[in-house]
Image: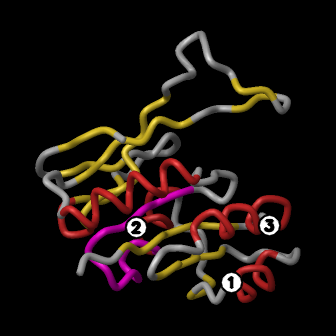
Amino acid sequence: MTRVSVAIITKDEEANIRECLESVKWADEIVVVDNGSTDHTLNICREYQAQLYQEEWKGYAGQKNSAIAKTLNEWVLSIDADERVTPALRQEIAKIIAEGPDRDGYYIARKNFFLGRWIRRCGWYPDFNLRLFRKSRGKFLERAVHERIAITGKLGYL
């Protein structure tokens, strides 16, 4: 049976992390790598039984790669603390995993919100981001900002 791990990085994400964790509580494992939060982020992560690690900052890609390396499952969903997995996306991921994925990574159409409103035009939707992938086939590339995952293999879209 194919299992899915979720990898999240945090620092002072008290305002966001509960909704994020609530949206991925269906996952087989949640790994959070935190960089010195001083708010209630860590307590909230513990409420959701997330595997919690505290580490010095290595840059966005380094921190995300560290979280991914700590996951136990081959399939990883990497999301940010201010992101949510919708019920529809959860169902689509479950279907692909149940059927046996025929790709090594999947782009997800991200909805961007600004001042509480979904921005549907000007190139902000769909904002495809590679977020679900086989751990053995991908990792985040080191960049100063706008890190992205490099995958060896076939890619699909959700």
| Mark pair 2, 3: CA separation | 19 Å
Is residue 72 covered in magenta? yes
| Mark pair 1, 2: CA separation | 22 Å
Secondary structure of the residue carrying tag 2 is helix
Of tags 1 and 2, the one toward the viewer is 1
Three-letter amino acid code at the position of disc 1: Tyr
In the image, is 42 to the left or to the right of 63? right
Q: How is the image coloured?
A: secondary structure
Q: Which of these two is toward me, 50 or 101?
A: 101
Three-letter amino acid code at the position of disc 2: Asn
Taking the spot 49% from the left edge, 25% from the top edge, the residue there is 126
Taking the spot 50% from the left edge, 67% from the top edge, the residue there is 63
Quick one: quadrant of the N terminus?
A: bottom left
Quarter of the image holding residue 52?
A: bottom right
For marks 1 and 3, the one nearer the N-term is 3
Taking the spot 42% from the left edge, 33% from the top edge, the residue there is 128
Per the rendering, the mark at residue 12 is: 3
| Mark pair 1, 3: CA separation | 17 Å
Quarter of the image holding residue 2?
A: bottom left
Number of marks drawn: 3
Q: Which residues are magenta?
A: 67-79
Three-letter amino acid code at the position of disc 3: Asp
| Whole-percent x, y for residue 18 in the image | 76, 68
Question: From the viewer's perspective, is residue 112 above or below residue 64?
Answer: above
Per the rendering, the mark at residue 133 is: none
Per the rendering, the mark at residue 48 is: 1
Q: Which residue is mark 2?
A: 65
Q: Is there CB contact under 8 Å for labels 1 and 3?
A: no
| Whole-percent x, y for residue 94 in the image | 37, 62
